[in-house]
Image (cartoon, rainbow, N blue to C red):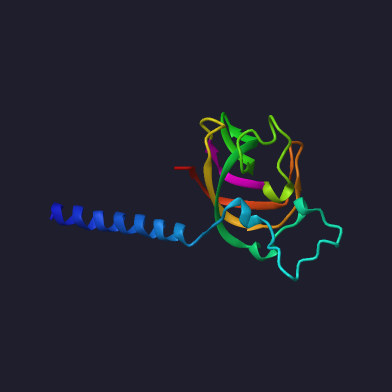
Amino acid sequence: MQKLFCIVKGLVVGGALLTAQFALSDAKTLSWQDLLPELDETFNLDDGINWGERVRLDLNEKDVRIPGFMVPLEYKEREVVTRFLLVPYFGACYHEPPPPPNQTIYAVYEPGYELGEIWEPVWIQGTISASRVEEDLATASYSVSANSIEPYD
C-alpha cells in the first residue's frame, strides 16, 4: 500500500511539473530585436517619432519570456527585488547611457526575486504591454507584470 501511495504521489508531482513546464512553453520567447517594429512598405519614418521610442503594439497583453539583466529599482527586503528595469546588456543604466526606451522593460514581480549578483542574466516571464514608464535611471517603452523569474542558463 505504501509503495502504491509513493507511485501515485510520484505521478501526481511529475504531472504537475510537466504541466508547469508545458505552461512555461506557452509563453512566446522574445529576443530584444523582437521589441522593434518591422520595417516594411507600410512603415512611415516621417511621422516624427524617434526610432528608440517605437514599439510593437501587437505584443500588448501577450505572455512572453525574455532574457536580460536586472537594474533594481525597489527592494522588498535585503536583496529581494520587486521592481526593476530589464535591459539587454550588463552595465546599462549604471556605467553607460541607458538603452533606448524600446530596448528597456519596466518590470514588477510582487513575490520578489533574490538577486545574487547584478551581472548574472535572468529570464523573466509575464504579460507585456507597450506602456511608457519614466524612472530616474532610464525610460522604458514596455512593461511586464512578471509571474516568474529564473536564472539564465
Q: Image quadrant of residue 86?
A: top right
Residue 51 in picture, x, y percent from top left: 77, 54
Report the residue at 48% width, 44% height from top. 150
Q: Image quadrant of residue 30?
A: bottom right
Report the residue at 24% width, 54% height from top. 10
State whether residue 153 is above or below residue 116: below
Task: Let me know if residue 123 is in the magenta part.
Answer: no
Prevalent SS, magenta region: strand
- Residue lying furthest front in this view? 41
Residue 140 visible: no
Q: Which residues are drawn in magenta? A: 105-114
State whether residue 128 is above or below residue 122: below
State whether residue 84 is above or below residue 146: above
Of 22 and 28, nearer the camera is 28
Report the residue at 61% width, 51% height from top. 32
Residue 69 in picture, x, y percent from top left: 58, 39
Q: How many numbered marks, from 0 up?
A: 0
Report the residue at 70% width, 35% height from top. 93
Residue 135 in picture, x, y percent from top left: 75, 40
- Residue lying furthest bottom in this view? 42
- The quarter of the rendered structure image containing the N terminus is bottom left
Residue 118 in picture, x, y percent from top left: 57, 32
Is 62 on the left-hand or right-hand side of 13? Answer: right
- The quarter of the rendered structure image containing the C terminus is top left
Task: Let me know if residue 113 is in the magenta part.
Answer: yes
Is 93 on the left-hand or right-hand side of 69? Answer: right
Residue 93 visible: yes
